[in-house]
Structure formats: structure tokens, C-alpha cells
Amino acid sequence: MRIAVLTSPHHVHANLVLNGLVAARGGQVVAVFESTRLLPGRSSVNALAHYLSVSGPAYVTAQAVKQFSFRIARAAYHLGGGRALLHPLADWRRAARANGTVVESVSDVNDPSFIARLEALKPDVLLSTLFNQILRPPALKVARHSYNLHPAPLPHGRGVSPTFWLLARGECEAGVTWHEMTPRVDVGTIAAQETFDAKSFRTEHALYSEAAKRGGRLLCTLLDAIDRGESPSQPPRADLLSSYDSLPTRAAYAQLRRRGNGLFTFRELVGRS
């Protein structure tokens, strides 16, 4: 099996999934492509301005601090001699490159030159692991199997930041889903899904991390099924109502804080929660 991955660079939670993937199937991961876009179809400056306008300075600053802190903690982990690939702070790139995996950036996943690059790798499976670009049909046809990881129990929680919205609304059930990619967002056939109780989580980071860990385990099961020549699919749960959310808003962030919840703690970022 030849696996190609689309992800976002230095993503705290994609890191958890990719660590497990490289540990389990490093020799089969032929390439990982990291998006250079902050938001699809927008320049970095325009995307930042849009984020600030919709989500507000407090939310955007907190997310920036989280991202910066994670990168510092990960660097300190490796400088301190950390070598365990499955540690939350381990950098999957080290092991991936040692296995001969190509690690490159992609600014537009639908650009014909990138699609040609992807086709040349001849992947059997294309995985979107918390990637922030939407694939159009030419890109989706490159591999026989194309799956996306979404940190919510689809069809509930479609769209952006479902773990944030769950905590902001005080919902009780969280989940994670691998589904077939289509040009429409988060509507493809469900390949694997798991739900879990969200009531004990007080930060988005903790909830998102739990979803990512479960998603990584589900991915192993999914790839094993593909090895057996299966194309796993399951119907969506009838009791899960379809919903869609966009970027977190200022009002929603204030609501999350009023519920006593937050985005992260520094102890969580270094794996000591």
C-alpha cells in the first residue's frame, strides 16, 4: 500500500495522528504535503484579518499562543533527548524522513502541477488529516481511496472547529469520523466513526486531542480493512442531526468562557494534564 497524506504544518492534533501513522506504517507513507494556507482561497494577511474580524483578538491571540507554545515544547522535547515517537510532543517528520517519506509544502492542492506531482507518487490511499483546503474532483481521483479525518460525529458537527462549538454549546457527545472525500464539505460516506462522552472535558485542546487519538486508532483499523480489499462504509446514525458551523465567533468564545471552559492549558500542551 502506498499512502499520501495532506495535513497542516505544526498542527497540534494532526501531530498525534501522524505520529501513530508513521510508527505503524512509516514505510508505506510515500509523501506528506503540508498546506501553506491559513484559510482556503485567501492570502495570509487577508485570512488573518478575516479571523480577527469574525473570532476577535482574544480568540486569535489564544490560538497563536497555543501554536507557538506547542512548537517550543516540541523543540525542547527533542533537545532534551526525547525519542518516543508516540509521545504527544514527538515530531513525526524525523521518523518519516528517515523512512524516505517526501515532506513538502502545497499552496493549492487543486493546481494541475500539484496534481501531476501527486499522480507521479501513485498513492493507493490519500488521507486528509486536519487539512485546510477543499479538494476538487481531479485531485480526488488520484487515489483509489480518499479519506478525511473530522473531529466530530458526522453528520453532526460539519464545518470548522467542531470541538470548539461542542464546548461552547455544552453538548454532551463528541466523536471522530473518517469519511470519503467529496467536493462538498464533510458529506462523504462514513468509513469509520467513534463517539465518546464529552462532559468531562473543560478545554478544546483536551477534547480535540482525545478525538485525534481515537481517530489515529480508527485509521489503523481502516487501513487494515483496505489491506483486506474492503471499502469500509457505514450509515450515519439516525439520531445525529446534521449541522454545520463556520469560524468561531466572538460571542461563541464568550459563551465558552462563561461555561467555565477554555481553549487549552500549558500543562496539557506538554502532556502533563
Image (tube, rainbow, N blue to C red):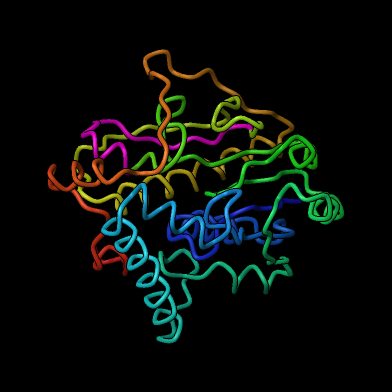
Q: Is residue 83 above or below residue 63?
A: below
Task: List the single residue furthest toward the top.
Answer: 238
Image spot of residue 173 (x, y percent): 29, 31
Q: Quadrant of residue 191?
A: top right
Image spot of residue 61 (x, y percent): 31, 63
State the quadrant of the C terminus. bottom left
Residue for point 43% across, 44% down: 214
Q: Is residue 194 magenta?
A: no
Image spot of residue 166 (x, y percent): 29, 36
Task: Pick whichever, 185 or 12, lies toward us.
Answer: 185
- Residues in magenta, as a range: 164-180
**258 with respect to 136 (left or right):** left
Image spot of residue 195 (x, y percent): 37, 32
Q: Quadrant of residue 103?
A: bottom right
Q: Is residue 2 above or below residue 97?
A: above
Give the total of numbered labels. Answer: 0
Q: Is residue 145 above or below residue 238?
A: below
Task: Pick whichever, 56 or 119, lies toward us.
Answer: 56
Residue for point 67% across, 58% down: 107
Task: Pick whichever, 219 or 56, lies toward us.
Answer: 56
**128 with respect to 11 (left or right):** right
